[in-house]
Amino acid sequence: MNKIKFISAILILLIVAAVIIKTSKEPVNEEIYLEPSVSVYLSQKDTKDNLKIEQYITGTVAAEMPASFATEALKAQAVCARTYAFKKLLDHTKYPLGADFSDDISCCQAFITQDEFEERHPLSPALYKKIEKAVNDTRGQIMLYNGQPLDALYSSCCGGQTDSSLYAWGKDVPYLRTVKCPYCKSAKPYKSMQYIPSEQICRQLNVAKPLSIKIIKRSISGRTTALEVNGKVMSAAAFRSAFNLPSTWWEFKITPQKVIVYSRGYGHGLGLCQYGANGMAQSGYNYQQILKHYYGDFSLYKLPY
Ligand SMILES: [Zn+2]
């Protein structure tokens, strides 16, 4: 899709209203674009909520990033969430009950309503307002690459370096390349340790003791892509999910009773690092500089509503 086609497609999503502004002299005809109304599927209640897109983005930022994070990090998150959402709208992705989005993070972005958010933060009534302001300060802004909205992936903490789509998916996406991130170093998930009983690994993977675990392939950032457990090759994604590990960036230490996993980061590590964004904001970077750091070259486009 080229830029002209993208802009036409996006304008179709926005309802055009003709308004006549009466002045003391001549009447002026003016076209304005209205903010799109969207629907989100609420998986716990099996219902659908109808709301304006900026309200949806607010609920997404509220669910995806701690509201205590610095304002410029919340703004960067709002632009990511909006870009991701418009990509889905343009792709005509549909969710249960015909909704445009879902709050299920296995297929879409997380989302919570203002009531749910306020129930979770009963002592901080100003926090939702802080998120609303960050969303409103970036109203309508999305990231484009080659005239298309970015696949604006983000994850909690990259552990020092983001991953590259070329290694993660075998596909080189120019704005999902590895970058160093010294900004998430003080985050709790930057480095962590997990213990898995050897018995559990043997039982779940159907192998016998003694255990041998070898990392056979790593991505450019150091994340594991494939490993061998007692000679059986498996993907890092499958191993991570089987043992509920925070990421795929590992070193292992094997003892007769347990396997110690030294993990770096939390999440898939592609695109924006949320803790890193907060670290950058605390160091004085604004949201545009934060987004440039993680996604490289893109243009910021303001939707006309
Ligand atoms: Zn990071």
Image (tube, rainbow, N blue to C red):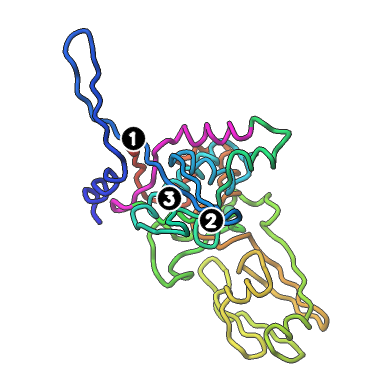
Mark 1: amino acid = Leu
136 falls in the magenta region: yes
Which numbered dot is residue 43? Answer: none
The front one of 16 and 156 is: 16
Q: Residue at 76% x, 74% y: name it.
A: 196
Residue 148 percent coordinates (x, y): 31, 53
SS at circle 2: loop
- Between disc 3 and disc 2, the foreground one is 3
Q: Quadrant of residue 66?
A: top right
Is 165 drawn above or below residue 140 in the view shown? below
Mark 2: amino acid = Lys
Which numbered dot is residue 180? Answer: 2
Which numbered dot is residue 85? Answer: 3
Q: Residue at 43% x, 50% y: name it.
A: 85
SS at circle 3: helix
92 falls in the magenta region: no
Is 207 drawn above or below residue 124 in the view shown? below
The front one of 33 and 68 is: 33
Q: Residues within 10 Å of mark 3 (few under 14, many from 20)?
A: many
SS at circle 1: strand
Mark 3: amino acid = Ala
The front one of 90 and 142 is: 90
Real-space Cα separation, disc 3 to disc 1, in angstroms: 17 Å
Q: Tell me which numbered mark, 3 or 2, is placed earlier along the sequence.
A: 3
Is 252 drawn above or below residue 31 in the view shown? below
Is 154 drawn above or below residue 240 in the view shown? above
Q: Which residues are magenta?
A: 127-148
Q: Tell me which numbered mark, 3 or 1, is placed earlier along the sequence.
A: 1
* Residue labelled with disc 1: 34
Disc 3 residue: CB within 8 Å of ligand 1: no
Q: Quadrant of the C terminus?
A: top left
